[in-house]
């Protein structure tokens, strides 16, 4: 296999950043040898080179917490690879979803309480705020007022915002479509928060549908739904 674009260092290794293909979370950093990279491409199960044990190893070979390869990229300099994978169980040996859960403070200190702030993206951050307003209502919080109004108030806003998206799309103005879609996504997150459903659970559902065609079977208990 031609790996001429990949630049291994003097130890014959290349850094491999591993990212959850569903929500973009950076799961870990490892190092790959040529053999590990080839094995990853061949088996679709992510392999690394252990610098401490000086041997090839498959992620999850003892714990069962594998990384299933979805895609692989090399950076512009050819000296780092990005592995997009679907994790089977937690990636970190500590049992956390990802290895990055300790914040480095402005004074350079670390070691504070574990945080998931490095995981996912803007939807996860919004969801965290929504859950915080649910647990600790604030009198001047719009989200708190929605929760206080109950599920009917939350759902009414989703229906209203869905209508606004439809009208904006009909009008064809890009800025309005973006604005109204952001409102719809936000209020949908509030509904998910009301039922304690994290965005990650929706990502898993979408990941299961990705690349499939046809309609969902009636056995699922849901009506037919188009796939990608």
Image (tube, grey):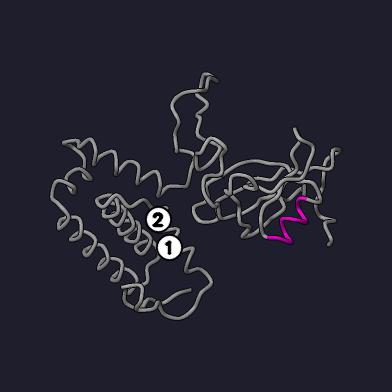
Residue found 63% across the figure and 45% down from its top: 62
Residue 81 in the image, given as x and y percentages of width and height = 70, 49
Any magenta on residue 128?
Answer: no
Residue found 76% across the figure and 48% down from its top: 77
For label 2, the SS is helix
Tag 2–tag 1 contact (CB < 8 Å): yes
Residue 13 in the image, given as x and y percentages of width and height = 79, 42
Q: Nearer the viewer, residue 57 or 177?
A: 57
For label 1, the SS is helix
Q: Nearer the viewer, residue 19 or 218?
A: 218
Is 40 located above or below residue 102 in the figure?
A: below
Question: Which residue is the site of mark 2?
Answer: 201
Kindly indicate the quadrant of the structure image that contains residue 156: bottom left
Residue 158 in the image, given as x and y percentages of width and height = 24, 61
Work out which residue is located at the far bottom of the displayed protein and give it: 214
Q: Which residues are magenta?
A: 36-43
Residue 127 in the image, given as x and y percentages of width and height = 34, 46
Say whether residue 212 is left or right of residue 135: right
Report how far apart the C-alphas of labels 2 and 1 lie in the structure: 7 Å
Residue found 49% across the figure and 53% down from its top: 23
Q: Nearer the viewer, residue 100 or 88?
A: 88
Work out which residue is located at the far front of the displayed protein and give it: 62
Question: Which residue is the site of mark 1?
Answer: 205
Is 142 located above or below residue 162 in the figure?
A: above
């Amino acid at each position: 296999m031609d790996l001429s674009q990949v630049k291994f260092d003097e130890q014959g290794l290349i850094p491999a950043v591993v990212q959850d293909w569903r929500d973009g979370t950076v799961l870990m950093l490892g190092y790959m040898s040529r053999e590990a990279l080839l094995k990853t491409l061949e088996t679709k199960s992510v392999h690394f080179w252990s610098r401490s044990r000086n041997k090839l190893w498959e992620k999850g070979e003892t714990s069962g917490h594998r990384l299933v390869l979805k895609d692989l990229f090399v950076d512009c300099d050819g000296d780092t690879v990005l592995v997009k994978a679907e994790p089977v169980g937690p990636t970190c040996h500590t049992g956390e979803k990802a290895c990055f859960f300790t914040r480095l403070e402005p004074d350079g200190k670390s070691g504070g309480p574990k945080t998931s702030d490095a995981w996912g993206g803007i939807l996860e951050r919004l969801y965290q705020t929504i859950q915080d307003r649910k647990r600790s209502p604030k009198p001047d919080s719009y989200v708190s007022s929605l929760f206080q109004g109950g599920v009917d108030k939350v759902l009414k806003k989703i229906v209203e915002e869905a209508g606004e998206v439809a009208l904006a799309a009909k009008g064809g103005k890009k800025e309005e479509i973006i604005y109204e879609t952001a409102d719809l996504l936000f209020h949908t997150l509030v509904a998910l928060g009301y039922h304690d459903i994290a965005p990650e659970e929706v990502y898993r559902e979408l990941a299961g549908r990705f690349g499939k065609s046809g309609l969902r079977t009636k056995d699922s208990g849901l009506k037919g739904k188009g796939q990608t």
